[in-house]
Image: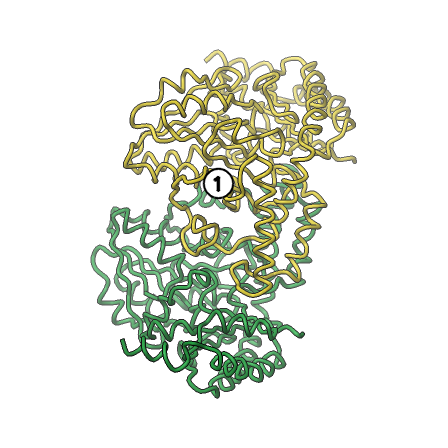
Chain colours: A yellow, B green
Amino acid sequence: MSTHYFDHVATTPLREEALEAMLPYLKEDFGNPLSQYEAGARAKAAIEEAREKVASLIGVRPSGIIFTASGAESNNFAIRGAALARQDKGTHIVVSKVEHHSILNPARFLEKSGFVVSYLPVDEHGLVDPEVLRKSITDETVLVSIIHASPEVGTIEPIKELAAVAKERGVLFHTDAVASAGNIMVDVGELGVDLMSLSAHQFGGPKGAAALYVKEGMRIVPLIYGGIQESGRRAGTENVPAIVGMGRAAELAASEVADNAKRLTKMRDRLIEGILKVPNVHLTGHRTKRLPGHASFVVEFIEGEAMLLMLAAKGIYVASGSACSSKALKASPVLLSMGVSASLAQGSVVFTMGGESTDEDVDYAIEEFPKVITRLREISPYAGGWGGQEESG
Amino acid sequence: MSTHYFDHVATTPLREEALEAMLPYLKEDFGNPLSQYEAGARAKAAIEEAREKVASLIGVRPSGIIFTASGAESNNFAIRGAALARQDKGTHIVVSKVEHHSILNPARFLEKSGFVVSYLPVDEHGLVDPEVLRKSITDETVLVSIIHASPEVGTIEPIKELAAVAKERGVLFHTDAVASAGNIMVDVGELGVDLMSLSAHQFGGPKGAAALYVKEGMRIVPLIYGGIQESGRRAGTENVPAIVGMGRAAELAASEVADNAKRLTKMRDRLIEGILKVPNVHLTGHRTKRLPGHASFVVEFIEGEAMLLMLAAKGIYVASGSACSSKALKASPVLLSMGVSASLAQGSVVFTMGGESTDEDVDYAIEEFPKVITRLREISPYAGGWGGQEESG
């Protein structure tokens, strides 16, 4: 059976070039970057080279990049670190209802520590309205965090406009660019953000390397205290091989992102068109303001996990909702916030493509998806009952 | 020039067997462990197998192991997470003065959040006295954290006795076993601790994988919030290759630790004997209650960095103090707490050996070290002046 990987939002394959770059640091160049002899210096130089490449991907200076171990760590660090550093100024922060769990859950932690958090609503496409943000900002607001692109529904938020609103009011702006950086053009200067999270394994780099961009001169309270790594802002022996792999993947992404985005947008549009031919299937997220390789749907009368497993049996690997909560089996808060009913949200399916995806993958998905849905509806106890019933409730 | 790596406390070479185990997960088996299709299931199974191996290394059940990205993260997680989970019971914690920065600095963060921290003194060998611990515990004490073995001076603390004192008083006990786990026999049950930090790259595993053991049923506040990974206790896409490498290294360490410790103890004792033949050189840490491969000294009239660089020029790679602070150029707080003068502490040199170290490495160090010291003392502006002067002050 041929396999067709449509789950790049969960993780991307590690690019061969990135692995090649990593291997010396998994073998002979194993030194600790803090060691003061040659082996340490080589590791240190490798990290600084990677820092330049990652910085270049998002259009910032290398000194603005702090390496972390995951997008989740970057997000926790960003919102807790920025909020705590400013708590003498105010204790109100603003996030959207379509943030990743690694923003929403630390926001709840901050609430327990005395912060007040506003959760901004979104429209039916998952978009945050800059005017709604404007009204939410008070004299107590110290931080706004809005996701750049949703891994679940693909929608790209108007970060430039949102950040401008925060800036007017002198409020810091963080964006979670984990799903976007490396996959679309992301320029910190153009977006006007103060903090940005990104993750290597979302653009062909390894798991275990991620970064937080922090604007020059900005104070941030560390999440991990200890040694003097990352200018004292993030302790722990650097994961040199993974950081080097992230650098190489960032370098490749920077040179390919424009062409890739163009190619993937065409493939995505063809996929959306094909999938929507199946009756009672609806696109989630915005039709055009979405990640190039991202096509997400809700399928009426079908339960997402069954769909996922039957597609997998055909060699089509997709997600049902965000990877980090796909086993939680609750209706997606992101879909609910967009006005999708709880029952319909159970039928969520997310196709995401990346650099190695091909037109043949799309052909295969378009051919097989309708058969799977037809078969599932034949055997589904929900078909024609459960879905409609709950929606009316 | 032959090279002789004596800096295993900074980082160990990645074992070939561990890299072999990692490679499939850096190539074809790149799936996200949370994905519900076969590739995800394979990644998940690989992590659970690694969890069993790491658990086995320290004699616990797999469910007690939470994977993290570094020893520093484990330490931050342990003391902040355990203290915050118990702040309704009390806000006093106890640590020693010879803890790693990744304990001391989060302890200072807790102080800013309203906790009171006691810093226990040590004797001239760096040992914490269980009676001193007993006197420090109050009705407000919720957590004690004492390092298992010092990376700087090699001293192994009497954790069993110290943990027993905490247990008597119903206080949780954490030990930072980053430098010890995999290098000496470490058994959680025998030591009687509730939490333990360990790190893969300290025993032949990769950078980027570490663990925190948490006693069954114990509540701990997460450091990184987000998805449901690690039973909701540590969010972030798992670094599958690194975790698999940690598991393999743990498995190897478990089977070899007794023999290795015996072999390295002999080599260490021979090294100590050889180095101490140089006049005005003193062992730091305890003579026998120390890590098998660990030999640390202070050298009078010599500045540590000069020594380190000249030894490196001879192909001997050592540390001067702990790697995480070696560029800070301050006198080591660990040495100061043991009663070493600030000037003498500047002449710190740490030799650490591991599995691939040989008798020839020891021969070479014993032969070359005296020459280096003689040469440095000839050219040193400090010789006979600076050292003595400050010491009298």
For the point 61% across and 56% down, the residue is: B245
Toward the top, the furthest residue is A392
Pick whichever, A55 or A130, lies toward us: A55
Q: What's the chain of the residue with tag 1?
A: A
Q: To which residue does mark 1 refer? A: A74
The amino acid pointed to by label 1 is Ser
Q: What x and y, as percent, mark residue A354?
A: 68, 32
For the point 25% across and 46% down, the residue is: B88
> Dividing the picture into quarters, in which one does residue A352 lie?
top right
Residue A373, placed above or below residue B45 = above
How many marks the image carries: the answer is 1
> Dividing the picture into quarters, in which one does residue A137 lie?
top left
Q: Quadrant of the C terminus of chain A?
A: top left
Q: What x and y, as percent, mark residue A328?
A: 50, 34
Helix, strand or loop for disc 1: helix
Q: What x and y, as percent, mark residue A164?
A: 44, 22
In screen coordinates, is A379 left or right of B60? right
Mark 1 crowd level (few <14, some 14–19, many ≥20, 10 Å Cα): many
